[in-house]
Amino acid sequence: MKLRAGRRQFLQAIAAATVASGTACQDKVDPTLSSSGGASSSGGGAGGTGGSASGTAGQTTAAGNSGSGGSGQPRLTSPLGVALLGLGKYASERLAPALKLTKHCRLAGIVTGTPSKIPTWQSQYGIETKNVYSYDTMGALLDNPDIHVVYIVTPNHLHAQFAIAAARAKKHVWCEKPMAMTPEECRNMIDACTENGVKLCIGYRLQHEPNTQTVRGYAAAAPFGAPKQLDALCGFSGFGPNDKEVWRLKKIPGGGSLFDMGVYCINAARQALGEEPIRVSRARQWTERPDLFAEVDEWTEFELVFPSGAVASCRSSFGETMDSLNITCASGSYELEPFQGYTGVRGAASDGTQFDQIIENQQARQMDDDALAIIEGRDVLVPGQEGERDVRILLAIQQSAKTGQPVELA
Ligand code: NAD
């Protein structure tokens, strides 16, 4: 394979970084923002253990590397090669370990703005130097048949630009929540993936979780009659004085508890009620520790009103650990607690039904589901349109909190 000059220089730089491992390096994207901070990430405890080891990289059965069996596209076989883009806390502590448990995809590459991270990732996961990219050289992924998927795990405001760059390199795109900062960004991501013949999956791991799926099924089955009231609480308390430069606390799009944790409440409410909200009301954003949360919401609360008349009352927080979903219906109720933790999602209904299925690892389940959908040329479980709906609601909540008025959702 011919290497472009920039790519050749980057590989030489990796070799140098490998020798001088540990050298600090500025992030190429936005040097004014801090990279991964010391604060705890969203979600609960440790992931599962065991599981099958992945085999060799996914093979194409025809020339090229991008497609999934559609017209003119090569068919891919399991396991697909995944490149993680953004090697922060979630990628390193959750996704990379989960990729050791997956059957249909494997960690084959990395894209990073911090060369000092490269040697550790290469040695820990056996990543070949030819599968290591910077944000500037990732266009060369186009020529790399080892990588089939790029998983975007950067701060929220960077998702769109990297997702579009990955799609243009003809790679399937997996993107973390919240999908992007505006509906327009979401639309551009969806269009880029469509135009380049690749799939787009949003990393809502809970939509792949079986107890969550049972609750979602109750929306249609209505075993306790029509849902009337949903309560969703989602937050964690993990920031301290040393975290002031962490992007989640900075006045940038996508900072604050609403975009980080409130999006789980929105997605759960829409899924559990099986309908789309028509109005945001009673939205309020505030901070109880102004020294720490001078620029973003430490807390957000809001209501979503649904066409059936059901109301979802939601609250997100960086100041309190909370993780519960309760649905009250005409003749009974059910709940999940925790509903968004990394492990142990479980619950019960008022008739004694237990939601107690256990899976080994949520992220491994999510990535295997998404990889199989690509391999089999099926629709993915959580497409870009799903992320876009939540982004519209996030912005409406911000607007409602600002004006003190309800906001109608078109
Ligand atoms: P993090 O700060 O730990 O990691 C972000 C990574 O992006 C770092 O490697 C950093 O170097 C890199 N980066 C690139 N450009 C940057 C810039 N301009 N400023 C700062 N960092 C930059 O964050 P995280 O907790 O890993 O979260 C990353 C994404 O994953 C977010 O979108 C978040 O919402 C999502 N996430 C999802 C879940 C989940 O359960 N689905 C859990 C945690 C985080």
Image (spheres, helix red, strand yellow):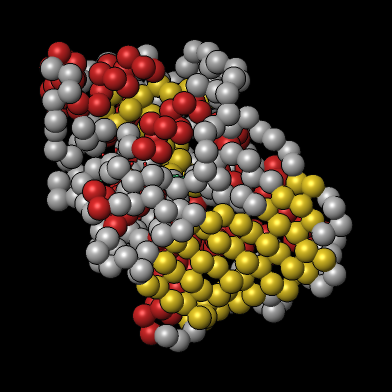
Ligand 1 positioned in quadrant: top left
User: In screen coordinates, is 155 left or right of 15?
Assistant: right
Where residue 229 sits, quadrant-wise, is bottom right
**Left or right side of 38 for 314:** right
Q: Residue at x 71, y 64 (%)?
A: 327
The residue positioned 72% from the left and 50% from the top of the image is 347
Q: Can residue 283 be seen in this view?
A: yes
- 146 and 313: which is toward the camera: 313
Count of all numbered marks drawn on residues in the image: 0
In the displayed structure, would residue 368 be above or below residue 227? above
Residue plotted at (55% across, 75% down) = 303
Question: Residue 324: where, in percent of width, then height?
Answer: 61, 57
x, y percent for residue 370: 56, 36
Please state, as top left, top right, bottom left or bottom right, where the N terminus lies in the image.
top left
**From the viewer's perspective, is residue 56 above or below residue 307?**
above
Residue 213 visible in this rendered orientation of the protein: no
Q: Position of residue 218 (x, y in %)?
A: 77, 57
x and y percentages locating residue 238 in the rendered image: 38, 50
Quarter of image, res 275: bottom right
Picture layout, residue 405 above or below residue 372: below
Going 59% across and 39% down the picture, which residue do you hit?
A: 343
Q: In the picture provided, is 120 more to the left or to the right than 313?
A: left
> Is 50 on the left or on the right of 124, as rendered?
right
